[in-house]
Image (cartoon, rainbow, N blue to C red):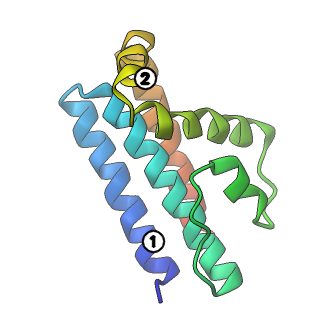
Amino acid sequence: MSTPERWMDQASYDIDTAKAMLDTKRLPYVLFMCQQAIEKALKALIIKKTNKLAPRIHNLGKLAESLDIDFSKEQLRFMMEVSTYYVRTRYPEELVLLGKETSPEMVNLVYLDSKEMVQWLSSKV
């Protein structure tokens, strides 16, 4: 069975990949990897709590709701925003639109907030 530590290792890898994508200006993929990193950190906590496999969903808000953690309203809002990047980076039409809606500054902020979220969740594993 997967362990919380393995999931957190993957979350760390994904946030590092987000940074590599940021450095090469592949902005939509930064957003996707940020979503993936937070998802995997949340799933690590779910596995720790339940001792079962994490659900195969990608909605960060729903994953967060299944945990006994007092997330702030801002954290929950941020997770709901980042959840949208999972879908929007997977379809060519959405990817084009997302590319038009992003800026390097916006993506950098999402990356920094995601990195902070992953570190915070990691401290709870």
Horizontal placement of 86 versus 68: left or right? left
Horizontal placement of 78 versus 89: left or right? right
Mark 1 neighbour class, 10 Å CA radius: few under 14, some 14 to 19, many 20 or more: many
Element class at badge 1: helix
Does residue 25 sit above or below 116 in this rendering?
above
In the rendered structure, find residue 102 and report the number of the disc placed on it. Answer: none
Query: Sequence order check: which comes first, mark 2 or mark 1?
Result: 1
How many numbered marks does the figure carry? 2
Cα–Cα gap, marks 2 and 1? 28 Å
- Quarter assignment of residue 97: top left
Does residue 122 sit above or below 73 in this rendering?
below
Residues tagged 2 and 1 counted as in contact (Cβ below 8 A): no
Residue 9: x, y in percent? 38, 70
Residue 110: x, y in percent? 48, 31
Does residue 54 sit above or below 17 in this rendering?
below
Question: Looking at the image, which residue sits at the far left?
Answer: 24
User: Which residue bears the numbered disc 2?
Assistant: 94
Tell me which amino acid carries mark 2: Glu
Instruction: Give the residue at x 59% y 58%.
Output: 57
Question: Looking at the image, which residue sits at the far top?
Answer: 100
Q: Nearer the viewer, mark 2 or mark 1?
A: 2
Tell me which amino acid carries mark 1: Trp
Residue 63: x, y in percent? 68, 58
User: Which residue bears the numbered disc 1?
Assistant: 7
The one of 116 and 94 positioned closer to us in this rendering? 94
